[in-house]
Image: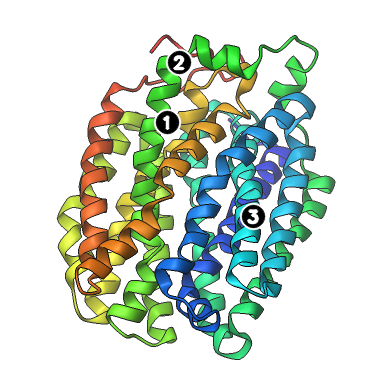
Amino acid sequence: MAWTKEQKQTVLACYLGWTLDAFDFFLMVFVLKDIAREFGTDIEAVSWATMLTLAARPIGALIFGRLADRYGRRPVLMANIVMYSVLGFASAFSPNLMVLLILRTLFGVAMGGEWGVGSSLTMESIPKESRGFVSGLLQAGYPSGYLLATLAFGQLFEHVGWRGMFMLSLLPALLTLYIRRNVPESPSWEAARHQEKPSLFATICAQWRLSLYAIILMTCFNFFSHGTQDLYPTFLRVQHKFDPHTVQAIALCLNVGAIIGGLTIGGLSERIGRRNAITLAALFALPVLPLWAFSSTPMALAAGAFLMQIAVQGAWGVIPAHLNEISPMAVRATFPGLVYQLGNLLASVNSPMQAHMAKLNGGDYGMAMATVAGVVAIAIAVLIRFSRERRGEPMEVMEPAPH
């Protein structure tokens, strides 16, 4: 089926929204060491900023998702982008660690809303035959944002410091001008805007098995991504003592692998099914673990990072389509984002946990990351087999089957 101009513009806008959201988030992971030094504390204490950002995301998913279900996807998405841009920018002016933690928590609220609203707008606007590939493209926005943060760190950090890095967070606000001019409202939301909508609580209670299952699944998925990404720059800078340019080069390989994985496995899911594609990607991580976590040379670590993120973001590349397909229609802007971000909340202990594990083992971040990645890769491969396969069903009439 041929795409309209408006469909292409919608996909581009939602991809960029998630890319720039991730860019603002990943600026933090490159500068934990530098913030700790300026504020006279250690990396474990600063890593709580990452945890608080993740922990606050369910609040944003709930607030912005409910607003989008009530008032439309498009205006809420624009408000969301402006909010996370301004809060990211404000982080540059933190006078102490406490203020920074507060600002990153509020940033987490804004970040938590973007994914659910953007993914529902996208999946409701495109032909059903394109959901697998577009799911991978949309999720590729996350490593694309990581890649942009990597480039910014490698090229600008030595000149502007960590505060200057956060000032870049204001740039995503410009995306709202594009959305206002070019992106139409979701046709599914427009068709149902005057229908009476059940409350979120009533919907989740009616589908409590599905809700609980989805939260557990997304907890494992979030441990999979954050457990392999958030402390990786610290692993390279602190354990291996690489300079910023070497860290940049390895992180670029990591993110190229992530983008390739998301697009490839997302597209493959249209042929072999969502569950089979996720299983394949998750299990691929296991043989890659030794190369990724226990190599010593930059070349080997880059190869390991590239392959690991093919697995991680390959599995993630199926999630935007799969979560939207199994979601109740009346709360589709809320449900996928909420279960995703509740999984984030439960997985938000990852950075402090891995930092503590490394401290207990003489600074061995590799062992801490490998332990988490190996366990959750197996858990995902098992859990996804219990999910419903809803590939190809019309989004307008799709209702969740009892789980």
User: What distance separates the C-alpha of mark 2 from that of mark 3?
Assistant: 29 Å
User: What distance separates the C-alpha of mark 2 from that of mark 1?
Assistant: 11 Å
Left or right: residue 187 versus residue 109 is right
SS label for mark 1: helix
Left or right: residue 48 versus residue 12 is left
Tell me the quarter of the picture where residue 227 sits. bottom left
Seen at 42% across and 19% down, the residue is 210
Left or right: residue 187 versus residue 147 is right
256, above or below 165, in the image: above
Which of the two discs, 1 and 3, labels the residue nearer the N terminus?
Answer: 3
112, above or below 175, in the image: above
221, above or below 247, in the image: above
Q: Position of residue 66 (x, y in %)?
A: 69, 28
Quadrant assignment for the N terminus: top right
Q: Position of residue 95 (x, y in %)?
A: 67, 75
Image coloring type: rainbow
Which of the two discs, 2 and 1, labels the residue nearer the N terminus?
Answer: 2
| Residue at the spot of label 2 | 208
42, above or below 114, in the image: below
Q: Amino acid at mark 1?
A: Ile
In the foreground, 374 or 304: 374
Q: Decide if residue 388 is in sight here.
A: yes
Seen at 27% across and 69% down, the residue is 359
Seen at 15% across and 55% down, the residue is 287
Q: Position of residue 182 (x, y in %)?
A: 80, 45
Seen at 77% across and 22% down, the residue is 190
User: What distance separates the C-alpha of mark 1 from that of mark 3?
Assistant: 22 Å
Q: Amino acid at mark 3?
A: Phe
| Residue at the spot of label 1 | 215
| Residue at the spot of label 3 | 107
Quadrant assignment for the C terminus: top left
